[in-house]
Amino acid sequence: MKRFCRLLLAPAALGALLAACHSDSKPSATATPPAAPGAPNAAAPLASAGGSPDAAYQIYRGQLPGAPDSLTLHLLTTKPLDADAQSVFATYAGADGHPYQLVGHRLADPDSLVLEDISPEKQAAGSSQGPRWRLRRQGTALVGTYQGQPLRLREARPAGALALFVQTFADSVEAFPGKKKSPWGQIEFQAAVPTGGPKELTDNVLRQLNDDSLPGSPVRPLIQIWARQRQQFAASYRQAAADSRSDAPADTAAPYGYSLRYQQQAATYVLWNQAPLLSLGYFTYDYSGGAHGNYATRTISYDTRTGQPLTYAAVFRPDARPRLGALIEAAVRRMLRIPAGQPLDGPLLVKKIPVTTNFYLTSGGAVFTYGPYEIASYAQGEVSVFIPMADLQPLLLHPNLAS
């Protein structure tokens, strides 16, 4: 049997794995971890439930070799469906508040970890590979090398950083129950919910996980959110299967092909966690037939004092778009090494970079994220650009927003 391939990776590392993830038969394991608590509004029940086994969010502090200041690393690991797979997502930033993405997998040794820096700014010209972090757990620390030089990171809980409850759910759905060699659809849902801060913060994160961000809408516990997602996936998957193979005999042994090996995956990433800001990435991937699946990351920053999401309209002045567009284009050119004066519609799909409202804040600036096909090809993946706070100050409604 082939295994259920993990796609809960940083989006920039996703494309190379897509072809390998359409397995030939039922996955070797189906896991549904213990239910999240029934009272999602309160931090205590979330924390006391313990989350999923081998799923955790941790913060580390340290200093890269040759770096002038220390960094903060946000590491989120989730429980695999197989013994040989582990999903890892991480971001780190220095004193300037510029975040960078890392992706990696634990090795056979559960205490070992290899991370790769996938931020274009960290990759050499003409290369798609970034610096490697080779680490091993030593007590509460991570010890190893960065680009071959010694590195030690200590676990920390900086003042103003929130703890997060991490829960993973997964299941498989048979397209044709009772039929031999039926294809299977696979669904996975990983959530990270703050266990501190105001009640409104937890409520608003849970609403977003339930695809219902309207103020005042009901707040559902994670187990109910998962149950709704699984029910909807199973219904739509089996309907699509019935429409495509309604005349398939019960004892068929013929292969069904990749088109019915549907996958739906969702994950929450921690992008920034320092008062007064908590920034999360809500990643989704969907394969429902065709050459490849589709994915996107919706990023949202929350004010940890009020628990409210910081929307574009709440952060930027109404007249900010022209200046902001110029800042984003200049940042895209620097990051992708597109010379000034060279048309964008060659390396990219657009002649002019539009201003996206898909952004998040850090203490040092804002990151604007474009999904596949918005400005770049599917193969290029998502494009995320950082604009320093000093450049954004004239465009903000409240200049001291991040402090």
Image (tube, grey):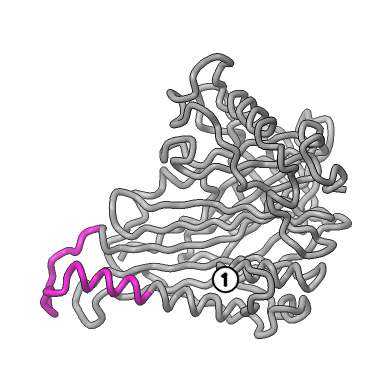
Q: Examine the image and state in which quarter residue 190 appears.
A: bottom right
Q: Examine the image and state in which quarter residue 332 appears.
A: top right
Q: How many marks?
A: 1
Q: Position of residue 376 (x, y in %)?
A: 46, 35
Q: Is residue 290 magenta?
A: no
User: Nearest the camera: 52 or 263?
Assistant: 263
Residue linked to disc 1? 210
Q: Which residues are magenta?
A: 234-258
Q: Position of residue 271 (x, y in %)?
A: 68, 51
Q: Examine the image and state in which quarter residue 317 appears.
A: top right
Outermost residue to the bottom: 38
Q: Position of residue 152 (x, y in %)?
A: 77, 44
Q: Is residue 265 left or right of residue 245?
A: right
User: Nearest the camera: 192 or 77?
Assistant: 192
Q: Position of residue 343 (x, y in %)?
A: 49, 19
Quarter of the image with the N terminus in it: bottom left
Name the residue rendered at 66%, 56% in the picture.
280
Residue 127 shows in the view: yes
Name the residue rendered at 61%, 71% in the picture.
167
The kind of residue tagged 1 is Asn
User: Nearest the camera: 332 or 91?
Assistant: 332
Name the residue rendered at 75%, 48% in the picture.
315
Q: Is residue 45 above or below residue 28?
A: below
Q: Is residue 349 left or right of residue 152?
A: left
